[in-house]
Amino acid sequence: MRCRKCPQRAVLRLPRHNTAFCGPCLTEFVNTQVQKAIKAQAMFSPDDRILVAVSGGKDSLALWEILLKLGYRADALYVDLGISGYSDRSREKVERFTHDVAEPCGAKLTIHTIADDAGAGIKELATLVKRPTCSTCGTIKRYQFNRIAWENKYDVMATGHNLDDEAARLLGNVLQWQEEYLQKQSPTLPASVEGFAKKVKPLYRMTEREMAAYAVVNRIDYLVEECPMAKGAKMLVYKDVLNRLEAESPGTKHRFYWGFLDKQKKAAAASSTLDMAHLDQATLQPCDTCKQPTTAGTCSFCRMMARAKTPTH
Ligand code: Q46
Ligand code: ZN
C-alpha cells in the first residue's frame, strides 16, 4: 500500500477519507486537521495561554506535543488519582514527556494530587461518599481542571477527547435523551460566567486509530494500558458499537457527530437563548462554599468533600 501523497509506503489506511498516508504525510494531515479545528471552532489564538489536561495516554500527550510544535503557549495539568500502580505509571510517562519534549519548548507541568486535599485516593474516596468511582473521578477532575485553569489565568483549557470519544458520548446522550447534556456537548465551551474557564477539544476531528498511529510515528512514549476503573464502562460499549458500524460503513462516526454539530449550530443561530453562554448565565450561580459556578446552592464537589469529612460515613 502506497501513500496517496508521496511515493513512500503507507503506514495507515483511512477508509473514511478513502486515502492512506506514510508517517510524515500522516503527521502533516493530523497537524492540518488540528489547525482546522482550532480555527473552525474559534478555540484560541497564538497569544492565548493554554492549559492541556494530560493523563499519560496517547491523545492528551499527542495534543500537548502538537500544540507546542505548532507554536502555541501550552502548559499542562496532570491529576494524580492515587490508583495504585496505574497512577504511578501514568505519572511517570507524563513527567518523562515533560522533561524530554515540553520543557525544552519552555512549557511546564502542574501536578494536582487528589489525596493531598481529599485525604484519600479516588477509589477510597468513592467508597467513602458512596458513589461510583468514575462519577466521583469525573466530578473531581472537572472541578480541579476548571479551578486551576481559572486561578492561574489560563485563557483556555484543552482536553484530548477525539472523534471516537465525542461520538460515543453523543450516542449515550441520545440513547438516554439527556437534553441538557446534548445542549452542552461541543468542541468549544465558552467562559460563559465568572469562574468558568473556556474549554476546547482540538482533536474532535481525529479518530482514536489516527491518534494512535500519530503517537507511534512521532515516538510519543505514552501509557497503553487503560485506567483499571474503565472496565465495564458504558462508553466502551458505545465505542464498540460505533466501531462495528464504522467497519460496515466508513465515515459513520464522522457523519453522526458532525451532523449533530451542524444541527446544534443551526438551532443556536435560530434562537439567541439556545447558545451556550445564555444557557449557563440562566442556570449558574456561585457555590456557597467555594464560589465556583454551580446549578445548585453548593456545588457537587463541595458536597462530596463535606460528605467525605463527615465521621458517620
Ligand atoms: S480515569 Fe477516572 Fe476515567 Fe479511571 S476512574 Fe473512571 S473516570 S476510568 S476517564
Ligand atoms: Zn463548591
Image (tube, rainbow, N blue to C red):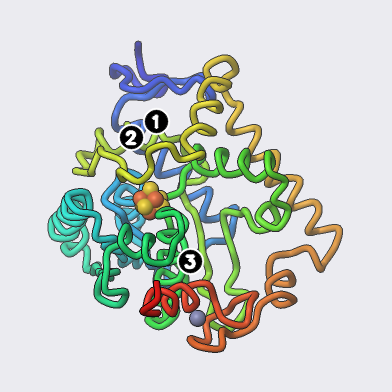
How crowded is the residue under tag 1: few (<14 C-alpha within 10 Å), some, or many (20+)? Answer: some
Secondary structure at numbered mark 3: loop
Residue at left offset 81%, top offset 58%: 269
Q: Which residue is mark 1?
A: 209
**Residue 262 in view:** yes
* Vertical order, 280 against 14 (above or below): below
How crowded is the residue under tag 2: few (<14 C-alpha within 10 Å), some, or many (20+)? Answer: some
Q: Position of residue 102 (x, y in %)?
A: 21, 60
Real-space Cα separation, disc 3 to disc 2, in angstroms: 26 Å
Q: Which numbered dot is residue 212?
A: 2
* Mark positioned earlier in the residue sequence (3 or 1): 3
**Residue 110 in view:** no
Real-space Cα separation, disc 1 to disc 2, in angstroms: 5 Å
* Residue 139 in the figure: left or right of residue 293: left
* Residue 205 in the figure: left or right of residue 273: left
Q: Are the two marked residues, 1 and 2, in contact with CB atoms closer than 8 angstroms?
A: yes
Identify residue type, mark 3.
Ser
* Mark positioned earlier in the residue sequence (3 or 2): 3
